[in-house]
Image (cartoon, rainbow, N blue to C red):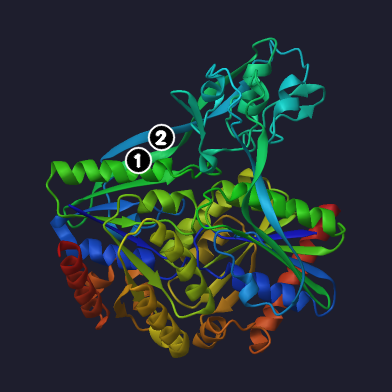
Amino acid sequence: MKIAIASGKGGTGKTTLSTNLAAFLAETRKVILTDLDVEEPNSGLFIQAGAVHAEDKFKMIPEWTKSCSLCGLCQDVCNFHAVLQLGTEIMVFPELCHSCYACSELCPDSALPMIPQKMGELKHFSDHQLSFVESRLDIGQERAVPLIAQTNKYIDEQFSEDIIKIYDSPPGTSCPVIEAVKDADFVILVTEPTPFGLHDLKLAVETVRELQKNFGVVINKYGIGNNNVMDYCEIEKINILAKISNDRRIAELYSRGELIYQHVPEVQSQLADIVNHITEMKVEISE
Amino acid sequence: MKEIVVISGKGGTGKTSVTASFAYLGGQDVIVADCDVDAADMHLLMQPDFRQSEDFYSGQLAVIDSERCTNCGACAEVCRFDAIPEVDGNYTIDALNCEGCGYCPRVCPEEAIKMEDRNVGKWYVSTIKTGSTMVHARLGIGAENSGKLVAKVKNEAKALAEKNEKKYIIVDGSPGVGCPVVSSLSGAHFVILVTEPTVSGLHDLKRVHELVKKFSIPAGCIINKADLNPQIAEQIVTYLNHEKIVHLSNLPYDETFTEAMVNGQTIIEFNKNHLSDILTESWEQIKQITNA
């Protein structure tokens, strides 16, 4: 089962929920936690586990071999302006390249073979029943989607389908989030009861509905702000899976990189509630 | 005209609340640009009137003409994005996966595929409550945040600032370190990094500053919720000194941030405690630095 943890707004507690839920579940069963927020991966700061494997991740880009008739077709076919003909030179701009292979495969002189270029790193850690995988995009690389896709592929290849998989997703509602949640069986949207939280939750709900995903909401920092998020969920008939109190103790534990549920019993029982909720919904769906 | 960009790497550090406060303090001297187009929230504090609204087109989408298509599958064979699945013997475009590369129409023997421009969102010009102007946008669900909409918002803001002889553009930047942030940063005169003293806050601050350094833009930092973890706050200050980032101010852990937001106000207007004094001092300091 794949559970993606997402949110429209950043800083609402995605990583907190992902790491705590994964560690809590790992006390009784096998769990894989994957950090797909490859631009700013933070889950690893909260997980103590031994390194198992590391690999560089590459994207494919064309490289000009110079044995070329300068027909200009490559520049013509590239929709991303990643290939330019300047005088008698062909220039490739790797950061603009989407790895579609059109220039390379359509070139009549085979003068643009595709070569790998490093875009980031994947690391795999393990501690008892918890496996943790994170990828981080190299600074200067602009596109997160290919790295997210390759990380998902690694998880699918390494682990069997019946193990619970938790994905810490990037914020927002654009491409990277879609790539992170599109294969999920269930999406947990984390929000906070503030005007920014509500505004971005609505966008996130619109996104998961468009993807036709089963989802529920976890309200973090419950007690600050106002009641509008709760009212919205009621009107829209959205399941609220848990309300985690606004508590300075929680913020302090988080600031030190500690797991919350091990210190705050209330949070432990909320995690159990979330697991029950999802299990029940899953049973309903399969029935 | 000076362009000041506020970014944070990590979300939820108070970036938008801080940006809105400076926009309010700057009043008529400032054009505001909300470049956090994927989760734009600044409008909730600035009361924009959406007086001008325009569609934004970026990238393309492949469209198959089923009348002409013979379902030969040549398109699906070249597609690297699994965007042309075969459903019941017919090839169709999966719009969420299509990157708009334009390879498939070039190999279609029936010329049955054409590329259409993609509407990826809207951008707006508004008069806001300070009487000044804000340029903002809304990226469509699942659209590619390629940085082009961010660039559009910034360029419009720049044109307006030049035309109206404004002193500053204040930009609410995007999270992360990818294209939208790169677009937010290009051309900036000064960067304000808003962080918090948490392991994640420090981690993300360092990553995003690596990016800022590539642009050689001078930077200042505001540590929000500074008393939450004095030890990490101290580590951040050491980092700032080492990297020659101006330490603008520390803000205390204070729910006034949220209360002001619930009231649809900036912290300056809400003015419940000394938070607004600290932010006012920081704004004065930023003006001095950028005009030096």
Above/below status of A253 relative to A204: below
Q: Give the camera-side residue of A184 and B264.
A: A184
Q: Secondary structure at mark 1?
A: helix
Nearer the viewer's eye, disc 1 or disc 2? 1
Q: Give the camera-side residue of B16 and A267.
A: B16
Q: Chain of mark 2?
A: B
Q: Secondary structure at mark 2?
A: strand
Above/below status of A274 relative to A142: below
* Picture coordinates of residue A189, whole percent (x, y): 60, 61
Indicate the quadrant where residue A111 lies.
top right
Q: Give me the residue at 33% from left, 73% from top.
A: B244
Res B63 visible: yes
Q: Give me the residue at 69% from left, 34% from top.
A: B80
* Picture coordinates of residue B149, whole percent (x, y): 40, 42
Q: Which residue is mark 2?
A: B56
Q: Amino acid at mark 1?
A: Lys
Label at residue B152: 1
* Picture coordinates of residue B3, whole percent (x, y): 25, 54
Q: Amino acid at mark 2?
A: Phe
How many residues crowd around disc 1 within 10 Å: few (fewer than 14), some, or many (20 or more)?
some
Above/below status of B280 relative to A142: below
Q: Give me the residue at 24% from left, 77% from top.
A: B276
Label at residue B229: none
Res B64 visible: no
